[in-house]
Image (cartoon, rainbow, N blue to C red):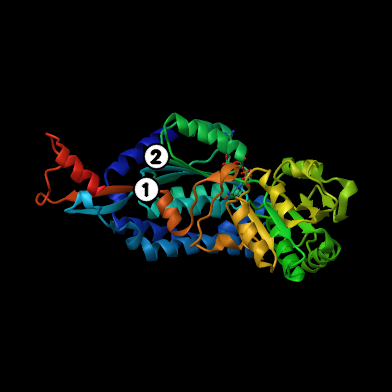
């Protein structure tokens, strides 16, 4: 069967109304849960082959995440799907108003390679919970994880409900010509624009989970030890190949020296050697070369070693960076950490305001005025004060970008809503309606209508 036949099958299947049934959704969410648990070892092996990601990181940043999502939807399916009563305005009395969340229909999810399981399965789990049929196109760059997801899903789910389509740019281009009720894309801003353009031809709504340059600001009022420890963890997790990793640091001049020393202390302590099990490799040669091109040898404060054979780049700090440097012109997406300094906090925020809105931003400070300015002045998808990345783990917070870093959000109830349409229904009683809106009109009727409004 080719992909357009599968899309057609899914469209026909959605029309049978079966996916709207809560027991149906529950049954397949439980099946997914069961399959992930049973195939956990295969998932670890595939990702290890793709870019040397450890079991520990794969469990904490991918598998546990997906299993938590399934648990959340299983527990909350009924309350999320129930119609919500809302009050009815005076002019619609006597009446009842309700909002019915309904599945959008046929969904296309396009995944990225850097957290290949989480970024592919988390959206399809939300789409299933909301009652949709779904096609997943994982990233071909992480080939083994793409294959293992295709095998697990295509051998265990009916294709008219859930199907994994393997392929790269050509296949995705073909897929984007077909009509869906929603496209959920995770990847670069550049490709996000291609997806948005293709979706516009069919007026298909999109969620675009994109990237950008996420700053971390460290002021003189920060707890420097905690800030360094958390930044080192978040930046070098997955070798910096994390969409919400701090891309660059803005450090207050007066604490720069002390802070850089503390960063180095933690990098050494965490021991990111070439063969360290906990240190992921760069995904491929192309990205490896791109990253080396961004490493300005004259600015290396710490690190700078690499091993092409292992696709290893040592955690590297670049100091004396300025906004014009090449490394500040694109998302780094690797273990290079440029450091800029500032002497005035508000000017630092203004500098961020001049750039595209990032996916995340982080502030390390104990100063309440700085926290308030950070929260209110600059726009970004989401972030943390005194930590990095961890906002993602809270299902009560929507996860998504703004401006160049994306459109829409998901996680928890926001994921359910992303794949649902909120259908409004007003039900009127047949009695008790004054006659004033009906012709023939009169001054008296207008007088009363003005009073009511
Ligand atoms: P990418 O944009 O290169 O690829 C993403 C997907 O798009 C892949 O499935 C790929 O096959 C497909 N694709 C690539 N080129 C295409 C084209 N010309 N036409 C149609 N489809 C195409 O991104 P990537 O390298 O996989 O991921 C890295 C980027 O993703 C970074 O910018 C990162 O910040 C971002 N990202 C964002 C999030 C988030 O949740 N916001 C998460 C992870 C990664």
Pointer 2 residue: 181
Q: Position of residue 11 (x, y in %)?
A: 34, 39
Q: Secondary structure at mark 2?
A: loop
**Looking at the image, is 203 positioned above or below residue 268?**
above
Asked if residue 122 lies left or right of residue 102, the reply is: right
Pointer 1 residue: 132
Asked if residue 112 lies left or right of residue 417, the reply is: right
Q: Secondary structure at mark 1?
A: loop
Residue displayed at 28% across by 49% down: 18
CA–CA distance between discs 2 and 1?
10 Å
Q: Position of residue 232 (x, y in %)?
A: 74, 62
Residue displayed at 32% across by 62% down: 78
Of the pair 281 and 188, the residue shown nearer to us: 188
Instruction: Check the image and name the residue furthest to the right.
Output: 298
Asked if residue 249 lies left or right of residue 141, the reply is: right
Tag 2 and tag 1, C-beta contact below 8 Å: yes
Check the picture and name the quadrant holding the N terminus.
Answer: top left
């Amino acid at each position: 069967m080719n992909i357009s036949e599968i899309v057609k099958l899914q469209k026909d299947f959605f029309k049978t109304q079966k996916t709207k049934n809560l027991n149906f959704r529950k049954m397949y969410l439980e099946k997914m849960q069961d399959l992930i648990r049973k195939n956990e070892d295969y998932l670890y092996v595939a990702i290890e082959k793709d870019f040397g990601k450890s079991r520990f990181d794969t469990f904490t940043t991918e598998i546990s995440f997906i299993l938590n999502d399934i648990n959340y939807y299983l527990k909350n399916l009924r309350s999320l799907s129930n119609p919500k009563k809302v009050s009815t305005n005076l002019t619609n009395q006597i009446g009842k108003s309700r909002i019915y969340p309904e599945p959008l229909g046929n969904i296309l999810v396009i995944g990225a390679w850097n957290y290949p399981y989480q970024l592919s399965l988390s959206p399809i789990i939300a789409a299933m919970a909301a009652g949709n049929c779904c096609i997943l196109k994982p990233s071909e760059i992480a080939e083994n994880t793409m294959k293992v997801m295709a095998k697990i899903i295509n051998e265990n789910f009916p294709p008219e409900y859930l199907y994994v389509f393997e392929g790269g740019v050509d296949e995705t281009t073909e897929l984007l010509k077909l009509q869906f009720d929603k496209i959920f894309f995770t990847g670069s801003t550049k490709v996000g624009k291609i997806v948005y353009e293709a979706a516009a031809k069919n007026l298909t709504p999109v969620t675009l989970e994109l990237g950008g340059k996420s700053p971390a600001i460290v002021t003189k009022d920060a707890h420097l030890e905690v800030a360094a420890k958390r930044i080192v963890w978040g930046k070098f997790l997955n070798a910096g190949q994390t969409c919400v990793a701090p891309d660059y640091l803005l450090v207050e001049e007066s604490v720069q020296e002390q802070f850089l020393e503390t960063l180095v202390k933690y990098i050494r302590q965490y021991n990111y050697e070439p063969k360290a099990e906990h240190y992921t490799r760069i995904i491929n040669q192309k990205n490896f070369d791109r990253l080396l091109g961004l490493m300005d040898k004259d600015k290396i404060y710490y690190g700078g070693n690499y091993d092409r054979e292992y696709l290893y780049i040592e955690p590297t700090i670049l100091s004396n960076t300025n906004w014009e440097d090449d490394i500040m012109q694109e998302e780094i997406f690797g273990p290079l950490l440029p450091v800029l300094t500032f002497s005035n906090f508000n000017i630092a925020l203004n500098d961020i305001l001049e750039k595209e809105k990032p996916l995340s931003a982080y502030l390390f400070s104990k100063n309440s005025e700085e926290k308030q300015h950070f929260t209110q002045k600059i726009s970004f998808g989401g972030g943390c004060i005194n930590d990095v990345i961890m906002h993602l783990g809270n299902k009560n917070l929507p996860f998504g970008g703004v401006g160049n870093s994306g459109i829409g959000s998901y996680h928890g109830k926001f994921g359910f809503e992303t794949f649902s349409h909120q259908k409004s229904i007003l039900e009127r009683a047949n009695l008790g309606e004054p006659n004033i809106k009906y012709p023939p009109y009169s001054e008296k009727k207008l007088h009363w209508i003005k009073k009511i409004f």
